[in-house]
Image: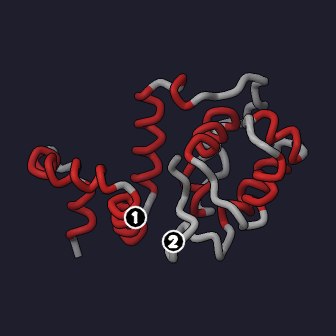
Amino acid sequence: MFSICDKCQGIFSLSDNIIGNNLRKIRQDQGLTLSKLAELLNTSSSYISEIENGKKSLSLNLIMSLSAKFKVNLNWLLTGEGLMYRQEKERPSNGIVNIADIPREQIKQWIDDFWNDLDKEKKVWLMVEMKRQFPEFALWLEKNEESLSEQNTSPDTVANTG
């Protein structure tokens, strides 16, 4: 399972605990206890506590569930920049969000919004980490670099500019 890197020494490192602090802010803003948030996200309260205290990283499923249930701005969640919510807050549904149930276009839009909100330095860092964490992604980029460059959408374009 993908998680925001426990070993990273960069923008999303656990040392400054931006993600954990922001998770706590969401929970408190929603008026939820650790156990209620954990129940809504289909995880344990100890895991939520460890994230909030900077001992564990946030999984991709939890990131997507937070975004879907609470309309959390992913850029804010991961960096502390921008607004906490994408739109007017909604109270969480009682259903559990499964990433497979989220339409691909919605996931693509979240990723596009997140990418577009990053500055150049963070984009470069993220591309390096994605290639390091997911060798298959690096291979895919190499195979598709020419067609991506033609579309002017290659993330490597960002990494290679100076």
Is the C-beta separation of discs 2 and 1 under 8 Å? yes
Q: Position of residue 83 (x, y in %)?
A: 63, 52
| Residue at disc 2, secondary structure | loop
Count the marks: 2
Q: Relative to 77, is 119 on the left or the right?
A: left
Q: Relative to 102, is 127 on the left or the right?
A: left
The answer to which of marks 2 and 1 sits earlier in the sequence is 2
Query: What residue would you read off at disc 1?
Result: 129
Q: Position of residue 141 (x, y in %)?
A: 21, 52
Image point 77% across, 60% down: which residue?
Answer: 50
Image point 68% across, 69% down: which residue?
Answer: 17
Number of residues whose C-alpha sits closer than 10 Å to that of mark 2, classed few (under 14), some (14–19) or many (20 or more): few
Q: Position of residue 30 (x, y in %)?
A: 83, 42
Image point 21% across, 70% down: which residue?
Answer: 161
Q: Quadrant of the C terminus?
A: bottom left
Q: Relative to 20, is 152 on the left or the right?
A: left
Q: Position of residue 42 (x, y in %)?
A: 74, 35
Query: What residue would you read off at disc 2?
Result: 8
Q: Amino acid at mark 2?
A: Cys
The answer to which quarter of the image holds residue 39 is top right
